[in-house]
Image (spheres, rainbow, N blue to C red):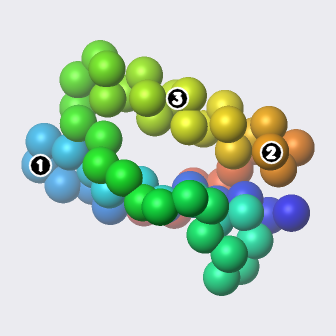
Amino acid sequence: MNPVIGLDLAKGESQVQAYLQRKKPYKKSFKVKYDFDGLASLLDFIKEVEDISGECPLWSY
């Protein structure tokens, strides 16, 4: 697997989408606000992708 997490950076929040393989999105995209709770949820999501794929995801932004 080649997991990738893409971030669309914007003022106040980001849109997040993960792919486990090319053209195979993992779950639906979601928004992350730039506060403690939002960043904690992003970290949980990153760990989830790592657990499922067995690899550390690459980043695209």
Query: Horizontal placement of 29 versus 31: left or right?
Result: right
Residue 11 numbered mark, or none: 1
Relative vertical location of residue 5 with respect to residue 23 in this rendering, above or below:
above
Relative vertical location of residue 12 with respect to residue 3 in this rendering, above or below:
above
Percent position of residue 39, x then y? 37, 27
Residue 52 numbered mark, or none: 2
State the CA–CA distance, disc 3 to disc 1: 19 Å
Q: Quadrant of residue 40?
A: top left
What secondary structure is marked by label 2?
Answer: helix
Q: Amino acid at mark 3?
A: Leu
Q: How many marks?
A: 3
Residue 43 numbered mark, or none: 3
Q: Is residue 1 visible from the viewing direction of this image?
A: yes
Verify CB contact (< 8 Å) between mark 3 and mark 1.
Answer: no
Mark 1: give few (<14), some (14-19) or many (20+) Cα within 10 Å.
Answer: few
- Residue at left 79%, top 64%? 2
State the CA–CA distance, disc 3 to disc 2: 14 Å
Image quadrant containing the C terminus? bottom left
Relative vertical location of residue 29 with respect to residue 50 in this rendering, above or below:
below
Percent position of residue 53, x then y? 82, 50
Query: Horizontal placement of 7 versus 56: left or right?
Result: left
Q: Amino acid at mark 2?
A: Ile
